Amino acid sequence: MDTPHLAEVTDDNLGDACRLTVAPHQRDYVAPVAESLAQAYVQPGVAWPRLVYAGDQLVGFVMGAFDPTCPIDYFQHGIWRLNIAAEHQGKGYGRFAVESVLAEARRRGAQAATVLWKPGEHSPEPFYLKLGFHPTGQVHEGEVVGRRQLWT
């Protein structure tokens, strides 16, 4: 595995970002990158979109959400989107992306971070549980709310 790193979305990498696709069986569980970037455009003070590279190869996209004044606590700090290209899954890039968002949440003073996932046969739930997220018992529009403490 090449050492992964994050990069901002720019004019130079936008097209590649929008062409990034997850495995076909995952498409019902995560929005396409282009939709995420549109959401980031209309919520620039909240969205934190980043591309995940391994060396110079684009392998994924992650978007954090940071809105500490949001009245819905599970939307204050967390992972809004995670797309790892189908051919690059299982190589640690998803874990790197999640940990990068959590590091940014810590930098911003968050005590915990959240992620929401849709339950189902190909749900990312096992992935998030393995990374230390725990279901809160809350459900938002059919998605399970998971939380992970950031400080011990």
Image (tube, grey):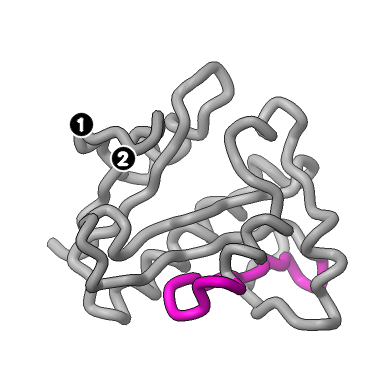
Q: Which mark is residue 137?
A: 1
> Total of numbered circles in the picture?
2
Residue furthest to the top in view is 121
Q: Position of residue 13 (x, y in %)?
A: 82, 75
Q: What amino acid is found at the position of numbered circle 2 in the picture?
A: Val
Q: Look at the picture and state if 82 lies above or below 130.
A: below
Residue 54 in magenta stretch = yes
49 with respect to 152 (left or right): right
Q: Kindly identify the residue that appears in the image at 85 percent across and 65 percent down.
A: 16
Residue that extends furthest to the front in the rendered view of this protein: 42
Q: x, y (%) of residue 75?
A: 32, 58
Q: Percent x, y for residue 149?
A: 20, 56
Separation of residues labelled 2 and 1 (CA atoms): 7 Å
Helix, strand or loop at label 1? It is strand
Q: In the rendered structure, which segment of residues is drawn in magenta?
A: 41-57
Residue under numbered circle 2: 145
Discs 2, 1 touching: Cβ within 8 Å: yes
- Which numbered disc flags the more N-terminal residue, 2 or 1? 1
